[in-house]
Image: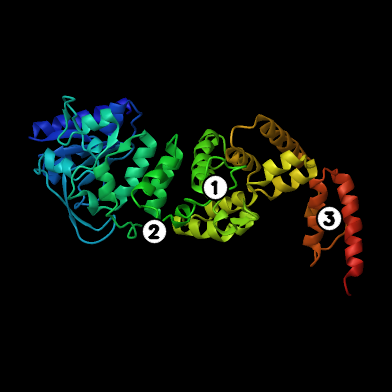
Amino acid sequence: MKASDEKKVKEIARKAEENGGRAYYVGGFVRDRLLGLPTKDIDVEIHGIFPDKLREIVSSEGTVLEMGESFGIFSLKGTDIDIAMPRKETVTGRGHRAFDVSVDPFIGVEKAAARRDFTVNALMEDVLTGEIIDNFGGLTDLKSKVLRHVTDESFPEDPLRVLRLAQFSARFGFSVYEGTKELCKTIDLSSLSKERIEGEMKKALLKSERPSVFFEVLRDVNGLDFWFPELKRLINLPQNPAFHPEGDVWVHTMQVLDRAVSFRDRVSRPFSFMMSALCHDLGKIEATKEIDGVIHAYGHESLGMPVVKDFLNRITGDKSVINYVLNMSLYHMKPGVMARAGSSQKSFNKLFDDSICPFDLICLALSDEGERNEDIEKILLQKLEIFNETMSRPFVQGKDLIEAGLTPGKSFSEILDYAHKLRLAGVSKESTLKQTLAFARKINKKEPH
């Protein structure tokens, strides 16, 4: 928390106290402070002050951005501070947003905390005194690293809490109270939006050291069925033990996902990369067969494209994520196979050119390996270095062909493709231009006039 923000919060708390109110840090801010984790977003709840008076107090510290009277939430422009009033929430239907919300400044700290999801998130800290208010055993659960729901009555009202449970477990390494697991098994997730699913999954994939825990928790609470049916089909899907002694495709996928974490900060697009690690073997659902007593999944990369696409379209509306993951899943096997086969630099250049991000593809391939294979990694990085150097050289473009006398026509793209192949083969620009012009003359002779 920035010192300037803390100063503003304390001044607001002091003014609230002068008017008969009390200010508390709440939610994840308290949890993370007690865990010794960095805290940025500052959530403050103020009791005992009517909305108009609170608005006046908050306005004295800066420009107020208000989320609406019914929510009673004020933000201070240019800060990470959110000031909220205690709220009552009444369920009006199914889904994460199906609540009638009204502020109640005098509801009391226990009832205010009771609407929280987990005990570790129901802790409150008096802004002025530092006293921790713990009405539901959150301190004990924080010390024991346990996620436990606050109340049986309110917890099932918001189905997003099942995803939050999995996400917190993955991020913080907390176990889940058995009673909370059983309660989650009764909650229907179908009313949630894909944006909410993607949001919680993104936090797990980008902020966890073991993102596999997110999916393992969902598996434990029967939370895979509606949103992640393809992942559920990986459970007990066999693999050839000669290549995959770890077990079924689910186990392998979870291991790859966790290994991908070591590359997460180095790749160009971390979320898309982690999604690729999750999706890379979905094609085995369609391709796995037993032939003469041996399990194979021939062509699972290409056979998996429709499966991967269906999964991604259910989870995200971001076309750039979808295109990236489809491309990475299609080519994920090739780097390792080609390195072991001693493939030519020309073949690697073609692969890297087809890849949406060659370095990320190498990272995915290495994540897919069992133990870290330094020899394979060295070969792949050397091949990529040569590819990058090759692609940095001057090359023939359309304007070069036009300057040489070619007129753009229906065969122009074919001619450019030919020039590009020569570039990938490492041919100099001068030689490429000569060979391409000769190819163009040959093509033009064949075309009817």
Which residue occupies the foreground of this view, 304 or 371? Answer: 371
Please state if 429 lies on the left or on the right of 171 as rendered: right
**Left or right relative to 10: residue 168:** right
Residue ID at (20%, 42%): 150
Callout 3 environment at 10 Å: few (<14), some (14 to 19), or many (20+)?
A: many
Task: Choose the circle earlier in sequence order: 3 or 1.
Answer: 1
Can the viewer see residue 65 in this picture? no
Secondary structure, mark 2, is loop
| Pointers 2 and 3 in contact (C-beta within 8 Å) | no
Q: Nearer the viewer, mark 2 or mark 3?
A: 2
Q: Residue at x 27, y 42 (%)?
A: 178
Q: Label 3 amino acid?
A: Leu
Label number found at residue 21? none
Residue 263 against residue 233 in the figure, above or below:
above
How far apart in space, not on screen, are marks 1 and 2 (Cα)? 20 Å
Q: Nearer the viewer, residue 312 or 284?
A: 284
First in sequence, mark 1 or 2: give its number. 2
Q: Nearer the viewer, mark 1 or mark 2?
A: 2
Q: Are marks 3 and 1 in contact (CB under 8 Å)?
A: no
Q: Report the residue marked by disc 3.
A: 401
Q: Name the disc covering residue 276, or none.
A: 1
The quadrant where residue 194 appears: bottom left
Q: Which residue has dot 2 on it?
A: 226
Q: Which residue type does callout 1 highlight?
A: Ser
Q: Earlier in the sequence, mark 2 or mark 3?
A: 2
Tag 2: Cα neighbours inside 10 Å, few (<14), some, or many (≥20)? some
